[in-house]
Image (spheres, rainbow, N blue to C red):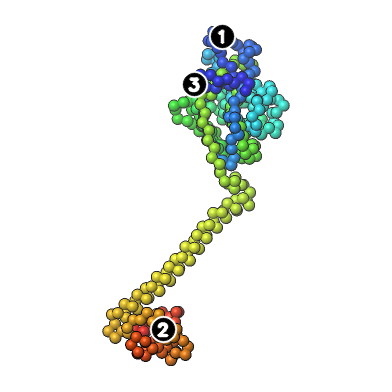
Amino acid sequence: MGSATSRNGYASLTPEPEEEQNIINSGSSNIDNKVGRVLYPHPVHVWPAIITTTFTIRITPFAKNSTSSGDGMALVFAQDNRPSPNDSYGSYLGMFDRSTQGGNYQQIGVELDTFMNEFDPDGNHIGIVTTSITNPVAFHSLNNTEVDLKSGRDIEVKVDYNGWTKMISISIGYSNSQLKSVLNHSINLPDIIPTSVYVGFTASTGKTLPESHQILNWFFTSVPLPVLSVKHSPIGKFKIIMMIVIPVLVLFTLLSVSREAWKRRYEKSDRKEDIESLSRTGVDAPKMFGYKELSKATCKFSKENIVGRGGFGSVYKGFMLENGKTIAVKKISATSKQGMFSVTS
């Protein structure tokens, strides 16, 4: 859109000189006050999300060794895919014009500013812009990073946004060199832009010496986050905490119940093995019978067959059909531990 063109494998946002000998000064009407914009054609989900984007740019003044070319370019997250506003050239970097400056247009931009206006810290800075180009929410001079935006060299920029912490982080450096972190700022995207936006780049020239703005490559990723993760209210935080705490408590309770049940089963099995062991090894130990055999012999432990009661259970009279013998069966109370071993005494 606007002055943007595609050539030789890169995107050029503003006009470029056709030949070295045709370099023209700032008064030429065909290259000053130009605006270009390129946007990814589909809306991109940006919150709640983790966003990482890396791009390489090259900004080159038309005049060699110029220190006063302008005006710069920006990575932009816009509410729609309309072209740049009318008269958004110069210091507005294709993001605003006089009618939209300070308005309610929902967008956020990372500006790479190459010209010092009266409201700028210098002519080589990076900033975060929302509703006003003259009043950025954050900015940082690049003069102490050894990176000159209009050096004509390939410059790599990395922008990260953490939807959990609401932090935007910007790093910059020349290509094939280590990037330096230059700006970190807390910003809540839901207060500024819609859930899905159009992402791309804008650039502009003014009435100073012109410069070209090239995008050599661009990588962008957005990983959606759970909606509750962006809640800042006490209720939202409480819900998140409860979503974590409740499953943990339920799991802990289930594990405790399972452990107790296993412990009881193990102790019961242990007692059974102990009494069976004593019964097999005792000199005068009684013969072992199965429960079904004893139940059959005592008519299912009928009350009519009770011949006595003790401290650990009741004694039943029984009759063994196999050998015709009358027997006495002591049924130990389920709550008795000592009673099991009294059988062998």
Mark found first going from the N terminus, 3 or 1: 1
The amino acid pointed to by label 1 is Asn
Mark found first going from the N terminus, 1 or 2: 1
Vertically, is 172 above or below 152?
below
Mark found first going from the N terminus, 2 or 3: 3
Vertically, is 117 above or below 23?
below
Could you tell me which residue is drawn at 70 percent across and 28 percent down?
100
Could you tell me which residue is drawn at 52 percent across and 22 percent down?
10
The amino acid pointed to by label 3 is Arg
In the picture provided, is 269 more to the left or to the right than 241?
A: left
Measure how far apart labels 1 and 2 are at the Cα level.
116 Å
Label 2: which residue? Answer: 296
* Closer to the eye: label 3 or 1: 1
Q: Are marks 3 and 1 in contact (CB under 8 Å)?
A: no
The extreme bottom residue here reads 307
Q: Secondary structure at mark 3?
A: loop
Q: Nearer the viewer, residue 229 or 330?
A: 330
Label 1: which residue? Answer: 22
Q: Which disc number belongs to residue 178?
A: none
Could you tell me which residue is drawn at 72 percent across and 26 percent down?
99
Could you tell me which residue is drawn at 47 percent across and 30 percent down?
179
* Closer to the eye: label 2 or 3: 2
Measure how far apart labels 3 and 1 are at the Cα level.
22 Å
Label 3: which residue? Answer: 153
